Image (cartoon, grey):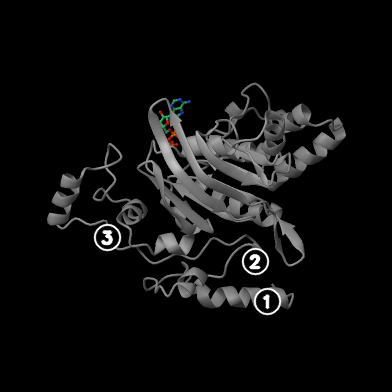
Amino acid sequence: MPSVIGQVTVGVEVMVDGLTKSFGRQVIWEDVSLTLPAGEISVLLGPSGTGKSVFLKTMVGLLRPDRGHIWIDGFDLANCAEAKLYELRRLFGVLFQDGALFGSLNLYDNIAFPLREHTRKSEAQVRQIVMEKVELVGLLGAETKLPGEISGGMRKRAGLARALVLDPEIILFDEPDSGLDPVRTAILNQLIVDINAEIEATFLIVTHDINTARTVPDNIGLMFRRELVMFGSREMLLSSDEPVVRQFLNARKHGPIGMSEEKDLSELEAEAQMGHDPGPLPPIPPQLMPSGNKIRRTQRPPGTWLAANGVIPPQGSFVDERGRNWLDEYPRLINAHLHGIA
Ligand SMILES: Nc1ncnc2c1ncn2[C@@H]1O[C@H](COP(=O)(O)OP(=O)(O)OP(=O)(O)O)[C@@H](O)[C@H]1O
């Protein structure tokens, strides 16, 4: 259901309920339930091969689950007829790992492709929309370039522009940061947050980048051993005691996750006896804010989940690289907005 914040409708909620997917006798994941809140940014983490890409494909209806439901706007995408599925798919924009651009088309034609394919817009209307999205992702001037002539970061941004042209309500990102250096990853993350602030769609990002997971989303989910171990507020995951969560977020060798994805009990006991532990989690970083002192309307003030659950975060949480503590800074920014001085 669309959520209403103040007077304005924001994005669309996606409720996944008891979803199970297998290929033949191989169960990929079982009984996955989570809600992507309308207009919020969620991240899905998990060791390689746990089925995150399969999950994205199932969400958008490219794969059918064995069981379960995906509720969007009161319709079950997992079990609806083809015609309805086609309609629901129009709500989605997908950024594939490599941008999935056509190598023989320039960026303009790549970005215009869904509009020419799925709408009856005139070329003048197509131009207006394409150029608007090109500007939004910072590619003005590069429209005539071929995908092979630009950097990986630019290709991702072009893929993002193409994912945006049909004004999606839900955007799925499959490892947007794969193959990018840390600087380009930081630029792309800022762009993702800025676009969320602007279009207020519901975002789900699959990533392996811990820094992205720690700073970008409102919610984090972790898949492990054929199930969704945890899904909830960023603060919940970043202050969790769960060994799998700590191992993954601390990028440690020791813990329940091994090369073959899982370790058996004797290996874990041996590690425990040797004093190996995934370690405590570091301070919770402040969440990445939109550029230009904007506020995302679905963003929760820092400390909300922690306070509601009586959890004290590690010392130094919410302090940015300039030494500002966002527990104080955020209300100040909200106040400035209320008084029109931000
Ligand atoms: N169409 C398919 N038919 C059969 N098996 C498949 C199919 N697609 C994926 N799989 C299997 O599903 C499992 C999960 O794959 P998936 O690509 O979703 O993992 P992932 O978590 O996204 O991995 P990574 O993080 O490395 O990208 C793998 O074992 C893969 O071989």
Q: Quadrant of residue 30?
A: top left
SS category of the residue bearing label 2: loop
The residue singled out by tag 3 in the image is 279
Q: Name the amino acid, label 1.
A: Ala
Q: Is residue 52 above or below residue 238?
A: above
Q: Residue at x 41, y 35 (%)?
A: 28
Task: Find out whether the residues at labels 2 and 1 contact each other: C-beta distance under 8 Å.
Answer: yes
SS category of the residue bearing label 1: helix
Residue 233 position, x and y percent, is 49, 61
Q: Name the amino acid, label 3.
A: Gly
Which residue occupies the foreground of this view, 264 or 306?
A: 264
Q: Which mark is in front, 3 or 2? A: 3
Packing grade of label 1 (10 A; few <14, some 14-19, many >=20) is few
Residue 325 position, x and y percent, is 49, 74
Q: CA distance from mark 3 to mark 1?
A: 39 Å
Q: CA distance from mark 3 to mark 2?
A: 35 Å
Q: Which mark is in front, 3 or 1? A: 3
Q: Quadrant of residue 257?
A: top left
Packing grade of label 2 (10 A; few <14, some 14-19, many >=20) is few
Reading the chain from its start, which is encountered first: label 2 or label 1? 2
Q: CA distance from mark 2 to mark 1?
A: 10 Å
Asked if ligand 1 lies within 8 A of label 3, the reply is no
Q: Residue at x 55, y 52 (%)?
A: 35
Which residue occupies the foreground of this view, 67 or 268?
A: 67
Ligand 1's image quarter is: top left
Q: Is residue 206 above or below residue 64?
A: below
Which residue occupies the foreground of this view, 196 or 92?
A: 92
The residue singled out by tag 2 in the image is 293
Q: Name the amino acid, label 2.
A: Asn
